[in-house]
Image (cartoon, helix red, strand yellow):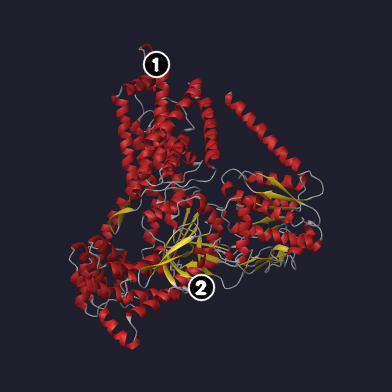
Amino acid sequence: MKNMKFTRRLAVLGAAVAMTLGSAAQAADTIKVGVLHSLSGTMAISETTLKDTVLMLIDEQNKKGGLLGKKLEAVVVDPASNWPLFAEKAEQLLVKDKVDVVFGCWTSVSRKSVLPVFEKNNGLLFYPVQYEGEESSKNVFYTGAAPNQQAIPAVDYLMKDIGVKRWVLAGTDYVYPRTTNKILEAYLQAKGVAPADIMINYTPFGHSDWQSIVSDIKKFGSAGKKTAVVSTINGDANVPFYKELGNQKISAEDIPVVAFSVGEEELAGIDTKPLVGHLAAWNYFMSVKSPVNTEWIKKWHAYTKNPKRTFNDPMEAHVIGFQMWVKAVEKVKSTDVNKVTDAMIGLEAPNLTGGIAKMLPNHHLTKPVLIGEVRADGQFDTVWQTKGLVAGDAWSDFLPGSKDIEADWVTLKCGNYNTKTKQCSGQNYK
Amino acid sequence: MLLAWAAIALPARAQSPDQDFAAAVAGLASDNFPDKLAAVTAISELRHPNGRAVLATLLDGKLYFRNADNKVFITDGGETQLALTDPLTAKAAGSGASDDFTRITTNNSLRKTLRSAVASFALSDPDADVRLAAVHEMLRSMDEDSVAILRARLEKESDADVKKAMHEGLALADLDSEDAATRLAAVKALEKSLSPDVYNRLTAMVAAGDDGVFPEPDERVRTTAREVIAAIDSSRAIYSTLETLFFGLSLGSVLVLAAIGLAITFGVMGVINMAHGELMMLGAYTTYVVQQLMPNHIGASILVAIPLAFLVSGCVGMLIERGVVRFLYGRPLETLLATFGVSLVLQQVVRDLFSANNRPVETPAWMAGSMQINEALSITYNRLYVILFMIIVFVILQMVLQKTSLGLKVRAVAQNRNMARAMGVRTQWVDAMTFGLGSGIAGVAGVALSQLTNVGPNLGQQYIIDSFMVVVFGGVGNLWGTLIGGMSLGVVSKVLEPWAGAVLAKIVVLIALILFIQRRPRGLFPQKGRAAEN
């Protein structure tokens, strides 16, 4: 009985929080910006910072006098790392709160969950995380990396600069690693790597007993050819993985691990000793010295009142996405979704690591690709970067199903146009 | 060899060794890795007395250059101010603001070269262990230079182990010799070696190319090489079986540790305690807090954390028993729901106290790394300690239950509550103590888990299902059953894992367990006698 009382009190508390959030959204004549990031549950670790980033960006913009003479107003909801709840909260933002734009989502499954809601209600979503591609929606702008802006260049670096001949593709068992590894496997085979030289391994979420897998990697890597691990291992399963590598005395010099999901934020809470020298591929590193980067890190530290807070790749994506949205709104003098999405294409905003990001007709960005080695302080030393910017490709050229598909919202007005059958399947606005 | 090289190089460049050294050190301030690599190689070849210090400092990431004039310094010190040492003279050169200096970065291939270079300096170290480590380091990346250095050192070497390691490295180099007899001798010398380099070289020698020509021209050498490969193969197979067995036992130990507290609360008392995982989590967080309190004694922190974790989790367990469980004895469904609620509360409390992020628990030096038995078999220390720790906990627990008066009362209440009460046992007190004991053991298990997995609010949830699985499989109410059950589940998982994958192995084990429980609902070691009836 005591427990029941407790849960009831919790429910009352929850309702109160929901009401305060709701009432805040009813102030008159503002431009509403929805923030759809998990503030509780497993993804809270990563997504809470993104919520803070958007709030900082709104704050900055309001200090400059707002947008179109109106103040920006954040509408924050908590989808609690619960994928169906993402769709409900998105519906709430679009239908009830009538927000003009939404910044949100982290995992691919949450994005897939809200996609129909945004398309049905003609909303506008900025998605800031590197993902597996194979998607382009009229209502979504993908400000994170597509596979050809992270995975493929990383593999190229290992192949050309490090001379890797044997490959371990290790990942957590869900959609992003599976699709990415499928693309990488096809890519490696196209480059002449024998199937026997590719080892693919999947583990459950939060896997902690890595002994036999690491021992297998060690054996696989002792065949006389330079071996590397391409890791799409997600979240906190990485810590025991790197620990086990260290314990079994596999150093980054022998078998380097290049990770796609380990960034500054993830390194901030862990003992980095066993990771030193291992690699990560991103489009942004906090350690990169550039005037824009220093400026934003200063703003971030001032906003959070914490000089130790890290800045990372998805945060940069939000900074770029937000700036572009502001420019688009100013250009068309309206927050109407159709007008803004049309105006977005071709807009530019500075990358924090140098160069100018440009929004492409397929709703992806041009980005630099950086490879960094983990330092003992949890930051990265850039060891390699692409000469220019890489244009994001929504549909991978290395998968049989998506080779012929193109996304172009300017001329084709389609997110998945098949160049062979000349048909647009799915969303089509003519 | 090196003296000769220096003699040739000197008149050609007409520079003093110090000037050459200074030029090479200046080259380290380059912004690209190939230039840095060239500079490192040059420093290594010059054998300047300060060379080792410069390279070792670079490896440590403490070599900086001044932004104003690109002058390289060995540095030491804090975030804002750096104490400088001139690398050329090894003398102090004042200090400077760290903003005026840039760290010379390294990458993996550069570090590998650096380690080998530093090792070649260490070959003349008076300590035999340092020399042995240096030889091993050099063997990881052999080239003509390092072979020449090793050959030169071999004559002066006195220690048997170091000599053996050198011989093996040189035998590997001898496989490239022009002379068939030398190659034959080298193959024979490598007979006992389990190093993968040796194996790869030998298999490459006897594998026919596309044109049917063997890389090794001499038939006798090939035959011997094949024999050696067969011998290596069979000993490798044995070691690989041993390794799998070890992995299985260590996973089993983790399962037993996680389940053994539950074997008491669930097995002996019959309470379905869903908060058991959270009690382990509290133990893990206790380790974290202890480490925060004694940051300079990480090695001892684990030993301090064990009794503390027992107390913390034990007390929380007794609170749960007194506050919730005691009102619900004999109502398993309500107990399940209530303790599940308690587990959520505990998770949220931890989240509010320590944040939702995982907490970094450091591994003490004595638990890191592995014991290299030979090239094919190494045993990681943390897993070894977990096995030993599990055995100790198990023995102590058995002693408590069998030899102490508390144990006697616990068993008596478990067998027949009313009779025990009639004999004057305070059953309520015994219940609280038993629950506290089981919970305390969970806390101790949490200390072990803090070394193996992430310490976060969800730690407990990952182990609760496995714990129940082990207890049910082993037979409820039987500690030996838990031990055997946990160990066999561990070994079976690890045997399955290499060919089924981690995900499928888990599923297969679960299905096998369900089938087993269908046939023997009371587990491996069912309780016999009257206690089994209720």
From the top left corner, tell me how far across and down residue B354 is, in percent. 52, 41
Q: Which residue is mark 2?
A: B68
**Residue in the image at 51% along x and 29% along y:** B339
**Residue in the image at 59% along x and 46% along y:** A44
Question: Is B128 positioned to the left or the right of B271 in the image?
Answer: left
- Say what secondary structure mark 2 lies in: loop
Instruction: Tell which of A70 and B325 is nearer to you.
Output: A70
State the separation of the CA atoms marked 2 and 1. Answer: 81 Å
Few, some or many residues within 10 Å of mark 1 (<14, 14–19, 20+): few
Q: Earlier in the sequence, mark 2 or mark 1?
A: 2
- Say what secondary structure mark 1 lies in: loop
Give the mark toward the camera: 2 or 1.
2
| Quarter in which the N terminus of chain B is drawn | bottom left
Identity, as a three-letter code, of the amino acid under mark 2: Ala
**Residue B464: in sight, yes or no?**
yes
From the top left corner, tell me how far across and down residue A139 is, in percent. 72, 57
Give the numbered dot on residue B480. none
Instruction: Tell which of B183 and B460 is nearer to you.
Output: B460
Please state the chain letter of the residue tagged with numbered disc 1 in the rendered image: B
